Image (tube, rainbow, N blue to C red):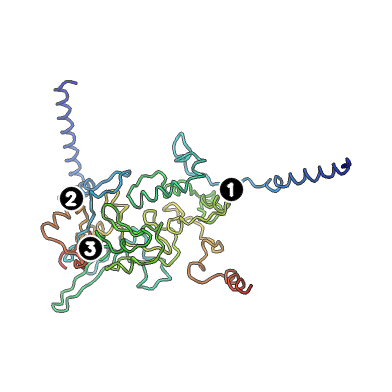
Amino acid sequence: MMSFRQFAKHLVILVGLSALPVLSNAGDLGPVLPKAKMKASDKTECVEPVGDMRKNHMEFLKHKRDLTMREGVRTKEHSLVECIDCHVTPNDNGEYARIGEDGHFCSSCHNYAAVKVDCFDCHSDLPEGASAKMHTLNKTNPHHNDLAANGSLSQETLQVLTEGDKK
Amino acid sequence: MSNSANHTNNYRRKFLAQSAAVAGLAIAPGIVLNQVAHAKADADKATDANRWGILIDTNKCNKGCTDCVTACQTENGWGKGETLSNKEQQAQWIRKVTITDKQTGHVQSLPLMCQHCETAPCVDVCPTGASMKREDGIVQVDKHICIGCRYCMMACPYKARSFVHEKLELQKATAPRGIGTVESCNMCAHKVDKGEDPACVTACSKAKHGAMIFGDLKDANSAISKELKKNGGEQIRADLGLNTGVRYQGL
């Protein structure tokens, strides 16, 4: 039979443990999304309900990309260029964040969720004409690393590759 | 509505349509007619009712002029930043070629780009379906599914395709292009879908050479079809039987 003292001790530990995840997440409010240029219409925030866009934007984009690329449909709805034009906006200093930086609309969430996005290997990450006030690409970001592109590998990668073999 | 009122309305409608057409002609004859000729609504798909083609008159093509190449570079954003490639590797969506007849010394100059074959070898060999022909005859690369194997580059008899070796940024919104994919002339599909001429053709007429005609090969009344019917047009390497969309005169 558990004494009251023992019970109290267990209770404190239990309460303490259950509070841990709450405490550790206390400062994290999720990704901070930059504001879009405007609402899609008077009634809707975006071209689809926001929740739908958050979950399914890649499906909309993929469907539209095939329609445009292969069949020549040029409507603006679900077009990546339109997303970029509206969602990639300058900060208070009038500067545009680049893909990979938290200030960029796509990266704000993709960085948080650690999901790689490769649209911008081919597509521009800024609205056309915005290049005058852009950040230069951050070379320490693995997505922008010149080393990866020009065939030579970074020191860390080399180390992993060579020493990984030895083990 | 009574019959006579109906009749009157029809008469008015016809009259208005005619005066609008006359007004259009008066403002800008070339441009308006041309745009009406192949305009497509944004939501419409490209169909096999059209087949786009370009007719190039080599006798009108100016030997020193490279306006078509520059216009293509400006429109599609190639020709800069390809620092890792040598000259043969760098992108050439369109190039000027000079041919000399050794017997007569006759020198000809002509622009060479993707010939938009009906039975395109590049489409035939592509293992992923990235190299594709649109319903309206435009041959292009779907870079979303291109794996960069470059079979199409080897298959093309015109050396029309190039491969991107560099990580690129700030591409044109209408011409996405990037590392690890093959690319070539797509007859400015984004402009054609809006009812405009490809950039090279516009540049050629702007330079007052008028060596290039763009139009619908399936429309017997288009300028290109009429010219082809009257004076003919050759295919480069006609022996391959590819039925190219780009034709030449004076070769």
In the image, which is nearer the foreground, mark 3 or mark 1? 3
Looking at this rendering, what residue extends furthest in the top direction?
B2
10 Å neighbourhood of mark 1: few (<14), some, or many (≥20)? some
User: Which amino acid is tagged 2?
Assistant: Asp
Residue under label 2, please give it.
B219
Residue closest to the eye, B171 or B158: B158
- Residue B69 figure quarter: bottom left
Q: Position of residue B17 (x, y in %)?
A: 18, 36
- Residue A7 figure quarter: top right
Specify whether residue B90 is in view.
yes
Q: Residue at x 29, y 58 (%)?
A: B139
Q: Position of residue B203 (x, y in %)?
A: 26, 59
- Residue B242, which numbered label? 3
Q: Position of residue B138 (x, y in %)?
A: 28, 56
Circle 1 marks a residue in which chain? A
Residue under label 1, please give it.
A31
Are the residues under badges 1 and 2 in a single subunit? Answer: no
Circle 2 marks a residue in which chain? B
In terms of sequence position, does the residue under pointer 3 or pointer 2 come before the other? 2
On-image quarter of the C terminus of chain A: bottom right
Vertical position of residue B96 compared to residue A104: above or below:
below
- Tag 2 secondary structure: loop
